[in-house]
Image (cartoon, rainbow, N blue to C red):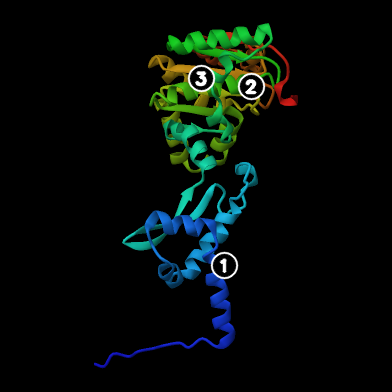
Amino acid sequence: MEKINITFELNEQQKASRALLIQNVLKDPNVLKFMKEHKVDETFITRHVQRFADWSIECGRCDHCPGLHACRQKETGYFLDLELDGILQTVYKPCDYQSLQNDLTAHEKQYLIRDGGKEVLLADFSSLLNADFEADYAESVAKIASWINQPNEKGYYLYGNSGVGKTYLASAMLNSFAKMGLNVAMVHVPSLAIKVKQSFDTPDVIDYTMAMIKKARVVVFDDIGAESLSGWFRDEILLPLLNYRMDHQKSTWFTSNLKIDGLRAHFRYNLKGDDEALKANRLMERIESLSSPLLVGGKNRRNT
């Protein structure tokens, strides 16, 4: 079978455009640096001029970038790069800002459940230790730091006004253990209540979620008392979870806007208004067995 040779002739306008493209690419500092590092000549660049032109545009998007919030790339934090290892290859790499964030969130894999955004992963307890806080907040930080150094199965029930930093403190504590390679979970209780309600006809989803919460070495039940209460959620979801964690001596924390007595009142009445004090007390016994109340005082940090 004869070999078929197919050639394309550029017209004069196309030749001029290509010549201008080559001229501009060969002036690009990034291309000049590439030529020096990989010891290639202008002929090599000319042969792959369109790829180098595209690369030059991608590199230009990163010039003078102040951070991920201002990223101009198609995929935030990642840029097209060229590598030469026998053949010229196009790869996507994280920029320095993205690499730093990747390092800061590498422990994400230890979260069996992580309700909340990336800010949960970025909460850092070491940054709190030398900060200048008002006395009541500093006292909370000191007690939590002491617990982290000598953890036990009885965690803290962090309560206080909205915005004082309860979830941040709890997230920072979780990250300390996630970075040690322990499985942890941040469970937003109102979201959990909605999830199990929506999954009522798909029990596998509920079973899996509960299994992950049981499995985690350290769990935070965030914003407990803010959920729309149903007797079923209290008795069939929360109670078995807390009972399991209590029996297996697994560290469990809570955050809430409510004091312990306020939480007890929250769990006492179902949606119909029926008084179910006995069932509420059963749940509260588990919460009080699993945690010690700790007031988180100070100012509303969401307004600063």
Q: Nearer the viewer, residue 144 or 77?
A: 77
What is the count of numbered marks?
3
Mark 1 or mark 3, which is nearer to you? 1
Viewport quadrant of the N terminus: bottom left
Q: Which residue is mark 1?
A: 24
Residues under labels 2 and 1: Cα distance? Answer: 64 Å
Label 3 secondary element? helix
Q: Is residue 82 visible?
A: no
- Residue 274 in the image: above or below residue 37: above
Residue depicted at 28% across the width and 90% down the height: 3
Q: Is residue 233 visible?
A: yes
- Mark 1 or mark 3, which has the lower sequence index? 1
Q: Are the two marked residues, 2 and 1, in contact with CB atoms closer than 8 angstroms?
A: no
The 10 Å Cα crowd at callout 1, few under 14, some 14 to 19, many 20 or more, is few
- Residue 257 in the image: above or below residue 34: above
Residue 225 numbered mark, or none: 2
Residues under labels 1 and 3: Cα distance? Answer: 53 Å
Amino acid residing under circle 3: Met
